[in-house]
Image (tube, grey):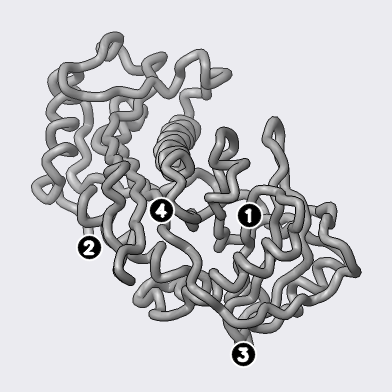
Amino acid sequence: MPVTRAALDAPSRAALRAILAVRPEAQAVDYPSLVPERGTADPPLLSAAEQIEAGPMRAVPVMDPVVGFSAFLDGTQNARILAWVEGVPYVFGTAAAAIRARRDRKLRTWETSPPIVQRRLYLPRAYASGFESATEGLDIVDTTAPELGSIPSRHPAALLERALSCLQHDRERLERAQVEAWVAADEGVLCADGSLPDRGPGRSSPRAVGAIKSHRTLHADGVALDVVLALRANERSPVFTVAGSGRAPVASWYVRTRDRAGRDALWGLVRLESAIVPDISARADLVSRWLLAENAPLALPDTRWDKMTYGVRDCESFLRAVS
């Protein structure tokens, strides 16, 4: 169902009024366009990884699931095109992040660091005259700022991709702030949806674990890939390292959380990330047990329930309500 202008929430309507106040000739979108959360998806990729756990490449049984995670973190982002001015998209985006902590066997908002919700207008000032200074009451992100690198072309798709990239970076920044607050509080182990932060204490502390559900890049090739894809429920791969440009390496491994009989090869496959510790085998066994303990209740009605913990599902539901 299309989203009518009248159905916009109050922050979006305020942003649209600010745009029209500066550029009255703007083509306000009658049915504001909801745009993808991210830019163009990366192509599927196999990336060989260095195994750091002793022993051959093989499936490792995970025994006796046990509850161990103290809290869960997730972030969300959404965006819509409010108007076009001479082919330039004016994108209003919302980024949010929250931690839900387990208290008396129930998930509650972590009181130490409340949820963060950020609403901003993303526009290229190089092509958007009249917005040289911030409009009162409206947080504006210049998607052509020098610190972002070369200015994208005026192609509408290029400008939209840059806006979505800036929104994604904002969401990652909010998530990193929440992880760092949790690590500093030292209240147990946090399960974060997605990879660990690219920098900061959240990447090096054993108080944070990342759970990755999407596998555009599989960190395995050759025999290692055969082992990963053949994992059965309650089995994990050996531990390997994952790094990146300018990022410290972390320990990582795959866990099959559910029986994939009759399903595709990635069904129930989760990749975990953790700080590298001396006894990495014991660490991988323990964290894998924690993950398997979160299989119930199911994260329905989300279509990714085979890989998603209920704690992360709870975070998403909460963020939809507050943002």
Where 1 falls versus 299 (above or below)? Answer: above
What residue sits right under mark 4 in the picture? Answer: 74
What is the CA distance from the residue labelled 2 to the residue labelled 1? Answer: 38 Å
What residue sits right under mark 1 in the picture? Answer: 273
User: CB of mark 4 within 8 Å of CB of mark 2?
Assistant: no
In the rendered structure, which amino acid carries the disc numbered 4? Asp
User: Is 150 placed left or right of 275 in the picture?
Assistant: left
What residue sits right under mark 3 in the picture? Answer: 262
What residue sits right under mark 2 in the picture? Answer: 1
* Mark 4, other Cα within 10 Å: few <14 / some 14–19 / many ≥20: many
Between disc 4 and disc 2, the foreground one is 4
Q: Residue placed farthest to the left in the image? A: 6
What is the CA distance from the residue labelled 1 to the residue labelled 4? Answer: 15 Å
- In the foreground, 241 or 128: 241
Between disc 1 and disc 3, the foreground one is 1
* Mark 2, other Cα within 10 Å: few <14 / some 14–19 / many ≥20: few
In the rendered structure, which amino acid carries the disc numbered 2? Met
What is the CA distance from the residue labelled 4 to the residue labelled 3? Answer: 30 Å
In the rendered structure, which amino acid carries the disc numbered 1? Glu
In the rendered structure, which amino acid carries the disc numbered 3? Gly
Residue at 82 percent of width and 60 percent of height:
53
- In the foreground, 278 or 302: 278
